[in-house]
Image (tube, rainbow, N blue to C red):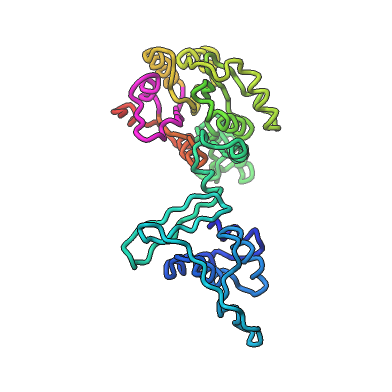
């Protein structure tokens, strides 16, 4: 995929049909040497002789800058072409176990794996992930500064859509609604001599539930808050969400993040939170949120998303008490913990173990691809009781 994508950028219009044909051909002709790979790619991906210079340049840039191998195929279609000198095929030394070495693109910087098999059996082609795919599945803590900026631009466009709820206001309904609109029915009856031939109904309006995001910006979450703040900014601008950050205290960032300029919004947000990269007072921050904002209506019937690893300085009993208060107000609680993606992770101790029984969804959100689970958990309807039972 990386090779075909590079051909597109280099001016060779290799479509998906030719890319699929190339993959099928590689199964029949395993690329044990550079010659075999070159001619397999050339015969399946090149449709016109005018594309050969671009194809050779891309091939040399990825698989080595040696001259393309010479073969009788160079004479196809031109019987008057001069005889070319024989060139020994370029081969690579086999590793000690006599298996063919991997052909990794030198310019792509992407890992490749080659499955093993018995000698003489056809082997599968190494799968080369594109740069975008690698970026999507890399944990935020492992990204470079440039990759973080690229992920931030993508995360700002991520839509966290909450489920719909019925409001007290109604609207006219052409079909059978929940109640009859007597006023409109009588008014329309004047057109038919006072006889109500058609009944007009009304139906309660539906609107998205409020969205509240509480992001942990303590020192243990610093590798992930660089991206999570972009998620908060996009949610405030796109879904009109309420955004808060906490470490040793709670800070509301809805107004600072409401700026259209993302860089300015993040700078104002960083300046508004003086406890950045400090300790974690999870229970105290939840209590401040519920006392100052939650009971006033912000959390009532809302989808509350907590982005934290659960490493708190508070007693677990205090965390559980505040989570119980939050659950009585919120429609749904989604906990995003990037530590969940680690092998062997189990929330058995500390603030995470105390908070988990009151959560409706528990996801990692550690990478760009994992944020799809966050969006799905936010959009889900109803509450889940499975986390309350057996949280191991």
Q: Which residues are magenta?
A: 330-359
Asked if residue 345 is among those painted magenta in the image, a careful observer would answer: yes
Q: Which residue is at 57% across, 39% downward?
A: 158
Pinpoint residue 83: horizontal percent, then vertical percent.
62, 83
Could you tell whether 26 is left or right of 191 in the image?
left
Could you tell whether 62 is left or right of 176 in the image?
right
Could you tell whether 317 is left or right of 263 in the image?
left
Q: Which residue is at 52% across, 21% downward?
A: 219
Pinpoint residue 250: horizontal percent, then vertical percent.
55, 16
Asked if residue 336 is among those painted magenta in the image, a careful observer would answer: yes
Q: Judge whether 169 appears above or below 9 on screen.
A: above
- Image quadrant in which you'd find residue 73: bottom right
The total of numbered circles placed on residues is 0
Q: Quadrant of the C terminus?
A: top left
Could you tell whether 194 is left or right of 103 in the image?
right
Pinpoint residue 66: horizontal percent, then vertical percent.
59, 64
> Can residue 212 be seen at all in this image of the molecule?
no
Q: Which residue is at 62% across, 66% downward?
A: 56
- Image quadrant in which you'd find residue 383: top left
> Can residue 119 be seen at all in this image of the molecule?
yes
Q: Nearer the viewer, residue 307 or 224?
A: 224
- Image quadrant in which you'd find residue 261: top right
Q: Residue furthest bottom?
A: 79
């Amino acid at each position: 995929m990386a090779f075909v994508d590079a051909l597109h950028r280099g001016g060779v219009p290799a479509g998906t049909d030719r890319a699929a044909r190339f993959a099928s051909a590689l199964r029949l002709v395993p690329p044990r040497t550079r010659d075999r790979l070159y001619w397999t790619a050339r015969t399946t991906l090149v449709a016109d002789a005018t594309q050969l210079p671009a194809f050779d340049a891309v091939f040399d840039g990825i698989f080595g800058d040696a001259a393309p191998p010479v073969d009788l195929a160079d004479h196809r279609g031109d019987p008057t072409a001069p005889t070319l000198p024989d060139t020994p095929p370029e081969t690579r030394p086999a590793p000690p176990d006599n298996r063919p070495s991997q052909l990794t693109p030198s310019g792509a910087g992407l890992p490749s794996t080659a499955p093993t098999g018995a000698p003489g059996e056809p082997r599968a082609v190494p799968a080369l992930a594109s740069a975008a795919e690698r970026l999507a599945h890399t944990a935020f803590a492992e990204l470079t500064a440039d990759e973080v900026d690229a992920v931030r631009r993508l995360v700002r466009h991520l839509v966290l859509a909450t489920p719909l709820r019925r409001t007290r206001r109604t609207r006219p309904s052409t079909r059978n609604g929940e109640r009859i609109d007597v006023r409109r029915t009588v008014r329309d009856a004047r057109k038919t001599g006072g006889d109500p031939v058609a009944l007009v109904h009304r139906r309660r309006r539906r609107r998205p539930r409020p969205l509240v995001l509480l992001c942990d910006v303590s020192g243990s979450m610093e590798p992930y808050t660089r991206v999570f703040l972009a998620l908060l900014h996009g949610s405030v601008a796109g879904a009109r969400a309420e955004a808060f950050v906490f470490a040793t205290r709670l800070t509301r960032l809805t107004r600072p993040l409401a700026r259209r300029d993302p860089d300015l919004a993040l700078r104002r947000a960083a300046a508004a939170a003086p406890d950045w990269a400090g300790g974690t007072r999870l229970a105290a921050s939840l209590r401040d949120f519920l006392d100052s904002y939650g009971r006033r209506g912000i959390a009532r019937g809302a989808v509350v998303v907590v982005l934290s690893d659960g490493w708190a300085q508070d007693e677990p009993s205090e965390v559980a008490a505040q989570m119980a208060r939050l659950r009585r107000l919120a429609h749904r609680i989604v906990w995003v913990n990037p530590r969940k993606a680690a092998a062997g992770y189990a929330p058995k101790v500390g603030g995470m173990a105390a908070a988990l029984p009151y959560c409706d969804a528990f996801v990692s959100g550690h990478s760009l691809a994992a944020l799809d689970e966050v969006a799905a958990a936010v959009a889900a309807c109803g509450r889940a009781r499975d986390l309350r039972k057996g949280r191991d």
